Amino acid sequence: SNCLFLLQYGGQCDVRTTIYELFKFDETNRSWLCSNNVSSDGSFVLSTPIDPLFLILPYLEEYASSRFIPYDHLFTDLQFPNLHKLKCSSIVADLHFIADMKKLDEYVAVYRFSSEKTLEWLHLKVRALIDALKKNFYLHKAVLEDERALTKLAWNIISDYVSCDWSQRLKISLDIQDTTHKRNYEDEVVNGNSSKKLCTNSTEPVDDYFALNGASSDKNNGTVNGAESQISQKLDEVEKQKAVNELNVALFRAKLTPTQKKLQKAGQKCRTLSNFFTKK
């Protein structure tokens, strides 16, 4: 993606240039209160310093991998004509971290890209970033106590400033492993460490959910049959009790006198007292 950088320098070659990377944070539904006014644009820009060697690294690797070239040749790019603004003493002083240097005379020097030095330099960046994460960021205690987790976090951040190839080289050099949460059930079954069975081509259940402490299948069948018998008995008892209740109601109605039967029928049409009151 496109990036924006801010250069702070005095225009002289001997003045150390500071390069800032600009980050814009623009979230939806955000505004700024400025005095008595409301600004609908709630975004803001944050500038952070960046090592200029990260910007020179791809050019040095492309043009000076197999031969020594003058310093000025590193800052020629038709696509980015402002690249020459990086040409200052600060980068010259640090080029030895990623390149071999030969002096032709007192004023002229040539440079050649060095993979070994670059990898060592990236290691230094990872270590410096780990120290900064410990001091300046609020990380979970589990992450702070896990050196591998901190190393992987620092590597992820550094990877945003180098090519994919260098990211992989640094990952291998740091011995960063891809963490997986998948369990190898097949190995567990082979080694006898799992009570579950792998389902192959069978559509039968993989577990016997009626097994009790290693009981045999015959005993399981007996347990199931016994449970079904108990359920059947319970249902029969419920049906019998229901029939008895219906019989008692019928006998009670049969004992009523004609006058009581008339009163019972009349009472069925009466409204309860609560029906005369309504909620307001």
Image (spheres, rainbow, N blue to C red):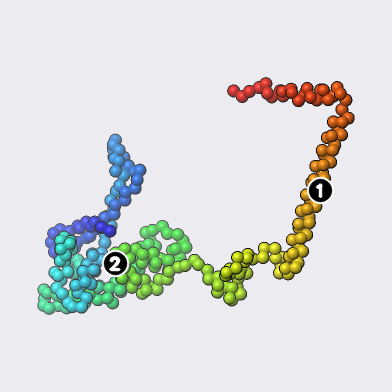
Residue at image point 36% right, 71% down: 171
Q: Residue at x 15, y 58 (%)?
A: 10
Hey, which quadrant is residue 222 in on the image?
Answer: bottom right
Front residue of 276/4: it is 276
Quadrant for the N terminus in the image: bottom left
Nearer to the camera, 132 or 240: 240
Q: Is residue 28 above or below residue 177?
A: above
In the image, residue 267 lies at what x, y percent?
77, 24
Q: Where is mark 2, residue-wise?
A: 162
Question: How far apart, in angstroms, are the residues tagged by discs 1 and 2?
Answer: 80 Å
Q: Residues within 10 Å of mark 2 (few under 14, many from 20)?
A: some
Q: Identify residue type, mark 2.
A: Val
x and y percentages locating residue 193 in the rendered image: 60, 73
Mark before the other along the chain sequence, 1 or 2:
2
Q: Residue at x 21, y 71 (%)?
A: 62
Question: Foreground: 265 or 31?
Answer: 265
Q: Residue 237 shows which numbered tag?
A: 1
